[in-house]
Amino acid sequence: MDYGKMSIMEFLNSVASDTPTPGGGAVGGLVAALSMALLGMVSSLTLKKKDISQDTKERFMEIRENVFERMREFVTHIEEDCDAFDKVMKAFKMPRKTEEEKEKRKLAIQGAMKRAAEVPLQLAERISSLNKDIDYVIEFGNKNAVSDAKSASILADAAVKIALENVNINLPYIKDEDFVKGMKERMSKVRTFSE
């Protein structure tokens, strides 16, 4: 399903339905994209001002260009998150009558759980890497739109926290201790926006 082509109401109805996807992880991707949209708006409004320096103008142009790429990336995350969770559900439904089937199912579950943890962690890392851009827009952006820049920060913070919750719920099911340790180390480096 192409979630990027859904209307807002179609997506909301899909989330509110009785299926597990799209769920929290997918919503986190949308929240991240909304954060970028607001960042883009404040950057665009700032670039319309006549009294900004060339350096500031170039920085806002760079941020604005990145915003559109990030929005697409975060909308793509919605699909990736749904696919990852669907693979977990599919793995749990695999047959387990014979020892061979049980082993195959166990391996499929572990692989799917790793992917289901990896996808939201990637989202958290990507959003977290934008903290300097968001801080810059709050500080130097059009002062008439500072509430929008701060709203972008609040949404980015929410998206990071949503993503980390989706990592945390999957880690206890993963038997590979080195993988789990690596994921926890990566999580410890993720910056939230309320710090």
Image (spheres, helix red, strand yellow):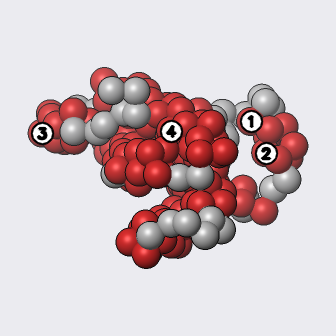
Residue position for label 3: 178
Few, some or many residues within 10 Å of mark 2 (<14, 14–19, 20+): some
Kindly indicate whether the residue at mark 2 contacts the one at mark 1 (C-beta within 8 angstroms). Answer: yes
- For badge 3, the amino acid type reads Asp
Residue position for label 2: 11
Q: Give x and y (percent) for residue 158.
A: 52, 31
Task: Please give the label number shown on residue 15.
Answer: 1
Q: Give x and y (percent) for residue 141.
A: 53, 52
Residue drawn at (46%, 51%) of the image: 140
Kindly indicate whether the residue at mark 1 contacts the one at mark 4 (C-beta within 8 angstroms). Answer: no
Q: Earlier in the sequence, mark 4 or mark 1?
A: 1
Q: Earlier in the sequence, mark 4 or mark 2?
A: 2
Residue position for label 4: 153
- For badge 4, the amino acid type reads Ser
Label 3 sits on a secondary structure element that is helix
- For badge 2, the amino acid type reads Phe
Kindly indicate whether the residue at mark 3 contacts the one at mark 1 (C-beta within 8 angstroms). Answer: no
- Of tags 4 and 1, which is closer to the observer? 4
Q: Earlier in the sequence, mark 1 or mark 3?
A: 1
Instruction: From the viewer's side, name the closer residue of 134 and 146.
Output: 146
